[in-house]
Image: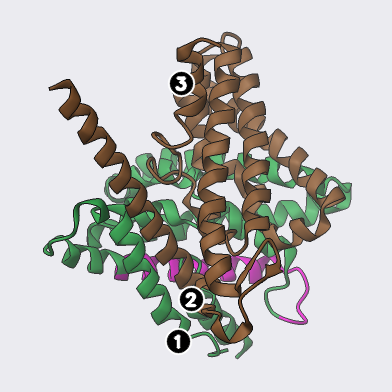
Amino acid sequence: MEYILMIIGAVLVNNIILVQFLGICPFLGVSSKVNTALGMGAAVTFVMALATLVTSLLQKYVLVPLDITFLQTIVFILVIASLVQMVEIMLKKVSPSLYRALGVFLPLITTNCAVLGVAINVTQQTIIPGHGFSVIDNTLYAVAIAIGFTLAITIFAGLREQLELVEIPKGMKGVPIALITAGILAMAFMGFANLV
Amino acid sequence: MSNSKLNILTKGFFKENPTLILVLGCCPTLAVTTSVTNALGMGMATTFVLLMSNMLISALKNVIPDKVRIPSYIVIIATFVSMIDLLIQGFLPSLSASLGVFIPLIVVNCIVLGRAEAFANKNSVFDSLLDGLGMGIGFTIALTLIGAIREILGSGSIMGFQFIPAEYHILIFVLAPGAFLVFGFVMAAVRYIVNKSEEKKKQKEA
């Protein structure tokens, strides 16, 4: 039960884009078509789960025992950057079709603050009350957060496809109108606020 | 200071404002602008990182091999971010609490890496310093502007100084949707003004 609550909380209530403001760049950058949004969502889910797993393990068995948590930022960003690079090389070899689908998004993910943000966030808070620091909980939480990311970016891509057809004042074209649309979408997500 | 040097410094303020024109570094812009104090704190922290990383990267541009330049930049940037993170935690614990995870996230702020790649690895140390400072100030201006609008409308105060009674506060502006709406409208207004001034310049030339 507590896992279901955690997943609902991560996907809807604390949606990473619309409530926590992480990963806005891909949200604005690659959300003009529903298909690319889904591809980006899949790539982020994959990388976020893997990155949180590795960084949580490092936090638990390396940084905390050696008392060097002040190196957290440097270690985490390097791990994420090399992980993305590794995933790209492996995907190219193992599954060329999946690589063609996700390949273009992978380099973008290194500078996606959502991945580093979640990796840092899970070290600062307990995901499920009473469980303490658990690597499995953290990884599950990362997957749930990534599903929330995919949900938001896909809905938003659908809205932007419709926006293409409307006449918009000159200064508002492009990013400004997208931000205002996102504001209205965020209002809709506020409806979930007291769900958990 | 010659005209071109001044131009390097001031282009980030308005004409090439990193947030409002180039649309870089959106996450902190949306997340920390609930009040002017937070916006200023974030702006200054980012300016420090930009300034120092631009200088160091420019100084090391002939030493760093081209193939590993991006990881090297990230390590340099992460070092300065850790420094400013620990400094803020030590001296300004309340600011550190309200900015939270967004201080370490300066590492992945596209402005910093973007300036390193686009400017610092091609130009002299002094020019890079000016560029970092200008971009940092531009970022701070944008953040403070959005922060001021949100704080006045949402909590009726400026830098914690209350001047609108509580029943007239529009709570939505300090919440998530307000961030998107204010950012969108400010960006539209700035683009409108910049477009207008460029049209005028063209008319004069013609």
Disc 1 is placed on an element classified as loop
Density class for disc 3 (Cα within 10 Å; few <14, some 14-19, many ≥20) is few
Determine if residue B94 is in view. yes
Which residue type does callout 3 highlight?
Asn
Tell me: residue B153, above or below residue B166.
above
Of A107 and B88, the residue lying toward us: B88
Q: Is residue A59 left or right of residue B17?
A: right
- Which range is magenta? A129-155
Density class for disc 1 (Cα within 10 Å; few <14, some 14-19, many ≥20) is few
Query: Which x, y percent locates residue B44?
Result: 66, 42
Q: Colour of chain A?
A: green
Determine if residue A95 is in view. no
Label drawn at residue B7: 3
Tell me: residue A131, above or below residue A65.
below
Pointers 3 and 1 in contact (C-beta within 8 Å): no
Magenta span includes B65: no
Q: Quadrant of residue A158?
A: bottom left
Residue carrying label 2 = A11
Quarter of the image with the N terminus of chain B is top right
Query: In the image, what residue occupies the spot 44% across and 38% down?
Result: B17
Tell me: residue A161, above or below residue A43.
below
Q: Colour of chain B?
A: brown
Which residue type does callout 1 highlight?
Gly
Q: Quadrant of residue B164?
A: bottom right
